[in-house]
Image: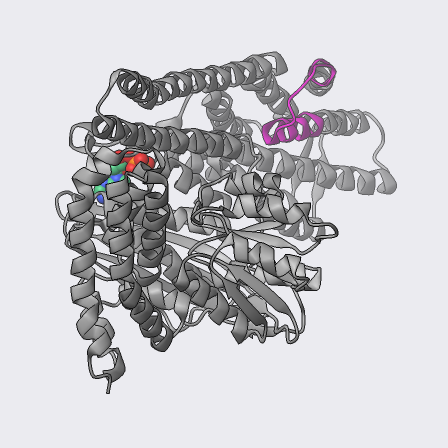
Amino acid sequence: MVGLQLPVCSVFFSILLAVVYFSKKRINSFENKIYSVMLISSIIDSLLVTFLQICGYFEITDTLHVIIEWVNKLDFILLICFTSCLFLYAVLITFPKIKQNINRLFFYSAIFNILGIIIMLFLDIDVTFLESNKATVVGGAPVVTAIVCATHILATIVVTLLGFKRISTRHIPIFMSIGLTILLLVLYSLDPFLIIISITLTFINFLMYFTIENPDLKMIEELNVARMHAERANLAKSEFLSSMSHEIRTPLNAIVGFSDCILRENDLQVAKEDAKDIVTASKNLLEIVNGILDISKIEANKMEIVETDYNPRETIYNLVKLVVPRIGEKPIEMKVGITQDLPQVLHGDVKKLKQIITNILTNAVKYTDKGTITVMVTCLNQEGISLLSISVEDTGRGIKPEKIDKLFNKFERLDEDRNTTIEGTGLGLAITKRLVEMMGGKIIVQSKFGEGSKFTVYLKQRISDQKEVKEENKTVVAKHYPGKKILVVDDNKINLKVASKILRELEISVEEVDNGFSCMEKIQNGEDYDMILLDDMMPRMSGSETLVQLKKIPAFSIPVIALTANAIEGMKEEYLKKGFDDYLAKPISRKELYRVLNQFLDGHQEGENGNKIDFGPLPQEIFEFSTTPQQEKTTYDLDYLKNKGIDVDKGLSLLRDEETYREMMTTFLQEIDQKIEKMKTFINEKNAKEYAVLAHGVKSDAKYFGFTELADIAYQHELKGKENNMDFIIKHWEKFDQEINRIKEIIRPYLEGDRS
Ligand code: ADP
């Protein structure tokens, strides 16, 4: 009966352990699953061994002999299973990061075990009973089992040694198991009749239970980890809140402080300077609030990916075009290189992409004083996917290596002392990184302090099968309206000409009048129009006043569109309230005009059959300063204007061709002297209101032609006129007059010049 005691003991203890273990609430982890398998293997193993021991007390018939052999083989399978679990367990607790690849490890070890088991099953096993219950098991099967189990134990030793730096109390059962296996071998060599394997397995399981696999201990451990995470998150939130309130308070203080100054200030010029500071601080505040909203949205997983088709080349050029003005006076050259392979149309979240590129590009501009900023876009196209690499390299101040890690932290601004003159919130890169990651990409920074930085974004985007982006705002449908008739009312001849030119291009017949009274007269005389474009700011009777009169005419139902240079936000609502049907800001944009025409002459927004007007190629010359070849002969004169500081492109973007530009400018030159005389008369008469109307006209013309400075001065005069501030007008008239004369001197030779 000696041989039975140990197996029965292990049956009893392993069942007890299993009951305790399985009755407790456990975490669903790989370790727990492995341990469960080990427990079950140990129970079955001890049951089988007990059965084999009991067989020893009976007469061994041939049938029983075969059964005993197969039960032995079954037991070998359990041993293989147990040692394999031990190995996997050792891997898991030594290298916790392997969890992502654990399935692959399971797969390989399962193949190894199955191979071993199949070979073992085919090999022979010879069980010889000596006296009573003592038996020896020899043959190929036990040898293969021993080899497989030894391999597991060896692998366990190797794994533990490889991760020796991570060895902790959790490894105690592993070491014990290794030690016990070696002890088993020694004992077996001394007495081959010992039945101690099952009790060893049970012992190992007990050890594991009391050191690592006790669900209570595990629960506490997990709870601790969860608590630590919660505490850390809470701390981060508090830090975020406190830095946020600090960041918000800075611009708010400026706003409150400067507002207070304005209240006390009598000098308008000083007050204006203060107001400028308020605007700057408010913009900064807005940027912070937007940034915070973005960050919280991303962190709360509320930011969604919205995918559309887009033209990557155009997107990048447009972004660069937007950022270039920020360079200001700094001697920086902006270069853009885009690979020829870049697909025509990509499918992805273009809004986020724009935000990402804008952030790194504006940083490059902000933190570079001179040199070059190079935007490089390359790609690798494969199986419908384009792997984009977008880099922005600058020759700016660079970043210290030890600071690179902090770069993407919220509110982290490096070298605060040097940053004082550069506006920023420290949120840009934090948002950028999160956006890139949301889109499944990567951002990399390379930088040499004092020499420059390079930010590279890698993103995968689907290549769209569309040939062209069907974007509403890219092309605007300009329909032709033969037979339609529009009345344009504007006191400014240039405005009249521009509007008429565009309308006539669309086969619309146009009538022009230069004041509200004539407009009234025409309607009262029964003339019918499909639309009236009515300028608001006109002398004697404004557009708004004219509209009031028009509405009094019975059955008046012509759509009236306000034309105004008052292009501030919220103006549209103002005009709609006054009874206008829509609003067009001056200088008139073709796109907007087409929209209004489509809406009121057709009754719907966009026509499908119209000719597509493409707004022409992108003005690439701004990026390729050094490489742009000299313009053709006919534009020589335009170059002359450009060199004189005139924003010719603006004029041309509106009037389309040089012919019209020149023609309009001739009208301007013919009229300007007369206008100057009138303005002088109004000054003498102290008639600020009428003076303001004329100044408004000059401003509007100046804007059309790209006389930026003149437009600014005229605008100031217009404002002062409206405020009835004759003192300012008298004091600054000379400057205004001088600027007009300067412009006259510039454009006269251009207009008289030989064009050939
Ligand atoms: P900020 O609003 O301050 O620009 P960001 O998060 O965009 O915030 O950038 C964080 C900090 O990283 C900046 O304050 C600046 O010190 C540094 N930085 C970012 N881009 C560059 C660059 N191109 N060259 C040098 N420093 C940079």
Is residue 21 highlighted in magenta? yes
Magenta residue span:
18-41
Relative to 660, is 58 on the left or the right? right
Residue at far bottom of view: 756
Q: Quadrant of the N terminus?
A: top right
Can residue 629 be seen here? The reply is no
- In this view of the protein, which residue sits in the foreground, 85 or 572? 572
Q: Is residue 318 visible?
A: yes
Instruction: State the residue at coordinates (42%, 18%).
Output: 241
Is residue 547 or residue 484 the one in the foreground? 547
Q: Magenta residues: mostly which secondary structure?
A: helix
- In the rendered structure, does residue 369 fall within the stretch colored magenta? no
The relative height of residue 505 versus residue 603 in the rendered view (above or below) is: below
Does 477 appear above or below 348? below
The quarter of the picture where the C terminus appears is: bottom left
Q: Position of residue 708 (x, y in %)?
A: 27, 54
- Where is residue 313, by image quadrant? bottom left
Indicate the colouring scheme.
one colour
Locate residue 416, reporting x and y percent: 20, 28
- All told, the count of numbered labels is 0
Where in the figure is residue 248, as x and y percent of width and height? 37, 22
What residue appears at the point 36 percent right and 29 percent down from the top-left corner? Answer: 282
Ligand 1: image quarter: top left
Query: Residue 437, how many percent across, how many down?
Result: 46, 43
Residue depicted at x 24% and y 75%: 751
Q: Nearer the viewer, residue 22 or 48?
A: 22
Q: Is residue 612 above or below residue 7?
A: below
Please give the name of the residue rendered at 30% of the width and 71% of the height, measured from the top-left corner: 666
